[in-house]
Image: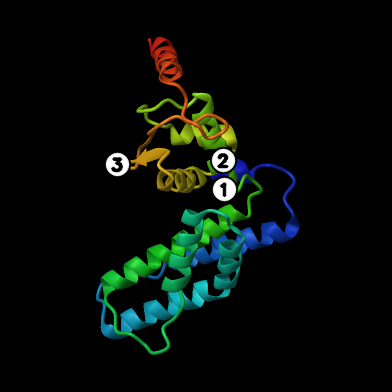
Amino acid sequence: MLAALFRRPPVDPTVAQTVDKLMTDIDKLRLVTSRRIVWSAEAVARAQHDIYATTGPWVRLARSRRDATDSPSDRARWDAWITALTPPERPVRGSFTEVCVLLGRARDMLQALRTSLVHCLPVSRVAEEIERLIGTGELVPGVRISRARLAKGLRVPVEHIDLALADLASKGLVEVRATGSAAVTRLHGANGSTLAAGRQRAVVDEAGRRAR
């Protein structure tokens, strides 16, 4: 999905350069744990330094993305990355496991920054569109929501769908399960009132006929 979004012409040269730099740094991060078998305390400290040095120039852009979003879930993930990838004032002795966790967060943040450079609906708008689909009965209570289908229909990365569903779950409109799947918990009309039970049954019946 992300590759398809980046194929949309035209791409601003400045954006293209930023994407290339992000990809270079993502590749650089892959090398942090790939060339070592024995992990001494010095090796761990060096790996931590390399991760902070690679992600440091991007933290400012991450803060701008956090400040620009209206989505609580989106803001929370940027906050978590910024906190994790801000070097401590004093060196902290870590372990190989902690290096791997830090590395994963670094790569996730850079990938999210790359995604944010694609012109598409912000997470808050995605949540609004999903809520509209719930209100019209196009998303049926109890039926698993197809994240990939929504992402394709709204022309956004799947990550935007996940964040929007998390926001809607906090409002009680959807249930996000431990498996990562999600389903509508109740239907709302366009004015926020719950749809009548008869309308709900009609929507469920129609969905059942289509599935046969």
Q: Position of residue 16 (x, y in %)?
A: 68, 57
Q: Is residue 153 visible?
A: yes
Residue occupying image coordinates x 27% and y 73%: 96
Of labels 3 and 2, the one closer to you = 2
Residue occupying image coordinates x 57% and y 48%: 124
Residue 161 located left or right of residue 64: left
Query: Residue at label 2?
Result: 128
Of labels 1 and 3, the one closer to you = 1
Q: Position of residue 68 (x, y in %)?
A: 62, 60
The residue type indicated by label 3 comes to Thr
Q: Quadrant of residue 90?
A: bottom left
Mark 1 and mark 3 lie on one chain; the one further toward the N terminus is: 1
Q: Residues within 10 Å of mark 3 (few under 14, many from 20)?
A: few
Residue 156 located left or right of residue 159: right
Quarter in which the C terminus is drawn: top left
Q: Position of residue 103 (x, y in %)?
A: 39, 67
The residue type indicated by label 2 comes to Glu
Query: Residue at label 1?
Result: 124
Q: Is residue 170 positioned above or below 62 on the image? A: above
Contact flag, marks 1 and 2 (Cβ < 8 Å)? yes
